[in-house]
Structures are given as C-alpha cells and as structure tokens.
Image: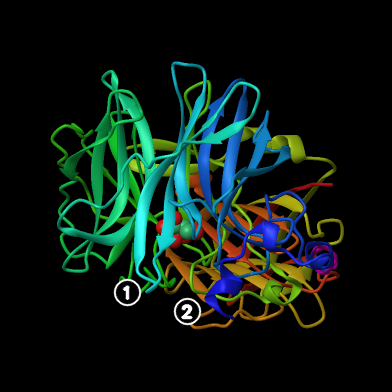
Amino acid sequence: MTNSDKYRLLSDAAPGELENLARRVNASPWRQHYHIQPNTGLLNDPNGFVYYNGQYHLFYQWHPFGPIHGMKYWYHVTSNDLVHWEDMGIGIEPGGQFDSHGAYSGSALAAEDGKLYLFYTGNTRDKDWVRHPYQCLAVLDQRGHITKQEAPIIDAPPPGYTAHFRDPKVWNAAGCHYAVLGAQRLNQTGCVLVYRSDDLHTWSFIGELETSLADFGYMWECPDYFELGEKGVLLFCPQGLPAEEDRFENIHQAGFLIGEPINPEKPHFQHGSFMELDRGFDFYAAQTTLSPDGKRILIGWMGLPDTTYPTDVHGWAHCLTLPRELIIQDDKLLQRPVKELELLRKEKYTASHTVQDAKIQLEEINGSSYELICELCMEGAKKAGIAFRTGDTEETLLYYDADSKYLVLDRTQSGAAMKNDNGSIRRYALDAKKMELRLFVDQSSVEIFINDGEAVMTARIFPAKDSNGVAFFTEGGKATFDALQWKFN
Ligand code: FRU
C-alpha cells in the first residue's frame, strides 16, 4: 500500500467504498457486544476522555478505511454512565496544514469559558517524508460544535529532542495549566516533557520531567500525570524494552510510576519502580479522567501497535477496554471495573464445585457476553482453573499453578491465532491459596480482574461463535470453585 493510499481522507473515499467495508465489518464473527469498537477500520488510543457539560466525552484514534495505521481522525462518543455510549461521529478531522497526516492523540480540558479544549498532535510529513509534529488545539462549544484553531500551540519540539514528540495530556494545578508530552531525546531514549500555560493558548516549555529512568526504551508515548490519594502517578508507554522473565512480554509496554506529587514548575519525580498496568496481552495507551464524584477512571486501547489481528481480514481492528477505577492502597495501584458496569447485568447463575483431577463442564454458566466472578480455593491441586469460550477444539484457560505460584492466562487454543511473535501465555506471580477472579467476557475479548483489582489481565481472543462453554478443572489434587455469573444481553 502506498503512502497516498494510507493517508487518504474520508472525502477521498470511492463511491460505495465505506458501505462495502461496513458490510464486511458487520459480518465479522468477532464484533463486540459491550465494548467501544470502530464502525469500520482501525481504532487505537483513547483520547480526550473527560466529564464535561453533564456527560462523559471520549474520543479515539480512528483510521476509517481498514485495519491499518494511516490517516487518523478523532472519533467521538458520549455517555451518561460509562456503559452505554452514543455515537457522535467524527470529532477532529485531519488534513489541514498542521495535521496533514493525522490528528494524533491528546486530551481534553473543560475551560472556564464553558468550552471543552481538545489538545492533540498534528502529524505531518514533508515531501521527503520527514516527520514534523505540531501540538494543536480544537474547541468544542456548548452546542457540540468543534472548531480547530488555525495555528498550532507548540510548533516544534524543544532543542535536544527528536520529532517523536506527541500526545499532550493537560491538567489544571495551582491556578494554571500544565501538559505532559511524550518525547524522545536526541540519544534515542524516551522521556516526558512538561509545558505550562496561563490561558490555554500560549504554552511555554518548562523542562524534562526528571525521573530515575535515564535509559528506559527509545520513546515514551501517551503520558498522563495525576494525583491520587497522597501520591503522584505517571502513566506512559515506553517502547523498546527487552522482555524479562515474566514482564514486558508485549511488543510495547503500558505502565506507571508512583511517587511524591511533582511540582510541575520544577519537574522532578521521586518514584518507585515501573509497573505494567495490565498483565495480559492487548493493552496500550491508557488515559484517565476524573468522574464528577472525584474517582480516577482509566480506559485503554485493547490492542498494540505493530501487531496484526484476525479481524484484519474483516476490515476492522481493535476496541477500547472497559473503564476501570484507580485506587491507591498501601502505595499500590488497584484497578477495579467501574461500578456502573453492573448496569449490564441480566440473568444470574451460580455454581459451586469441589473438583478433583477432573474437568467439569458447567450447565447454565456459558455464553459469549458475561461477567463471571469466581472464588478459587486451592486444596492440594497442582493446577486449578477455569476454561471458558470452550468448544470442540477451542478453550481459553485461566489457572493457578501451585508449583510455580503463577496465575496463568493461556490463549494457545482460544481460536483463530494471533501471529504469536510474543507468545500465547501470560503469567502473574501470586502467592495465594485463595483468589478472586472476575472475568468480563465479550465476543472477542476477556478482561480479568484479580483479587479486587491487584492486577488485571486483558486479552483479545478469537473463538468460533458457538464456543461458549465454561468448565472448571484441576490436576494433581483438589480445589473448590464458588462462581457467580451475570449474563449480559
Ligand atoms: C500510540 C500512538 C501515539 C500517537 C497515536 C497515533 O498508540 O502511536 O503516540 O499519537 O498512536 O495514532
């Protein structure tokens, strides 16, 4: 595919092209039931997540024409409850002088003038295909109309940094506005830069956020800084970290640092070690916002850059994760599915079994769109767990391995295969006899919340439509399962 094919605008669509694509997409067996997904083409990062004017607004990176990273739009959805989302159509359209090759990621801030300010990176390429990033502004007014501002608010990276300079996340503190941006130093290492503004239009560079990670990946994308409890939290996505024993196994990482709140005027961050936000396969570019009652809510992209997926052949790729509430307890970051997700619950089924060296198929508990809460108690078994989305030859496994003390998510037999460059097993070290596993299963994904939010494992899976079984199994001894399922419609 040529660059001019990849960077087409919607106005360049051939007659009937998008309708034909939509037909292919709608016939895909892996369309989700309750996750945000693109109507056609590719979705990536969540952008501009904010509560404004009595509603949640959320945008996402969108390439309309197919499952490729080409021209990016901001696509807009709104919600009253974080569960049911209304399709608002295109938010920011690229193609201007300062965003000729895409309206890249960014954030939103509700301003005192009653308007919503949308900060994004204008991606441009010159005739020699050299990248020139601009940080741009668009304003959404009370009537829902979005106007792009003519000139960029930041027209180049500061000296000492490359053109990998993007993804502004803006917040208010001490009477003015600050932004963190993802950047790359000239020595090809990633970092975060801090800017300030008094009026949201004029921005000045304060400096690099000093951390103890001087050489930690070649680029940091999608930073987010916020305070929670007494702590400062920095989210970002370092690219190019080598995999370790049971960490950093995805192609790029999405994680966080917890530390002392920063003074953005003298940006130095005293922090603990880098932790992954998700211990599964498909998670990147998370962004947070505050709910009206002061909760910190996170949504991520359930996908990864530079990775192909089985839905590609149907003309679409990716979805967003469910919203998670972030909590800090004993200096640890917990992530819990937002309470509003209970709105999805319909019929309820329960099952309790003690299983000894067997696999028992459950009768009423099944399906492809549900929440399953299971308390697993190891009573001597070497391995015990749940097989779900099971069919004749397919199953996705979540089990505890008592010898290695790992909780294991195995999608080796889940269905249509991912190109498994990064393996089909993820492990989370857990030293426990008893654990709570809370699964949100959709047509082509699972999100697993472990022990009320101490860790999350997320995976896209691509089973056949009728692979809907659920089973409990143990090997080498006994375990008890107490399960509760809520089916969703
Ligand atoms: C992260 C990212 C961002 C960029 C956007 C482009 O996935 O690469 O850094 O702004 O996607 O779609």
Residue name at image x 13 percent, y 35 percent: 266
Residue 237 visible to the viewer: no
73 part of magenta stretch: no
With 235 as the anchor, is 70 left or right in this view?
right
Local crowd at mark 1 within 10 Å, few (<14), some, or many (≥20)? Answer: few
Q: Residue 331's x, y, as percent?
A: 30, 40
Give the SS element for disc 2.
loop
Answer with the quadrant where ligand 1 appears in the image.
bottom left
With 374 as the anchor, is 132 left or right in this view?
left
Residue 435 visible to the viewer: yes
Give the SS element for disc 1.
loop
Of 366 and 200, the residue lying toward us = 200
Q: Residue 146's x, y, as percent?
A: 58, 34
Local crowd at mark 2 within 10 Å, few (<14), some, or many (≥20)? Answer: some
Q: In terms of image quadrants, where is residue 469?
A: bottom right
- The dominant secondary structure in magenta is helix
Inter-mark Cα distance, 1 to 2: 12 Å
Above or below, comparing residue 196 to residue 120 in the picture? above
Q: Residue 264's x, y, as percent?
A: 21, 33
Q: Residue 335's x, y, as percent?
A: 48, 44
Q: In terms of image quadrants, where is residue 217?
A: bottom left
Residue name at image x 51 percent, y 48 percent: 451
Q: Which amino acid does label 2 sit on?
A: Asn
Label ID, residue 422: 2
Of 219 and 393, the residue lying toward us = 219
Question: What residue would you read off at disc 1?
Answer: 244
Q: Which stretch is magenta?
A: 22-27
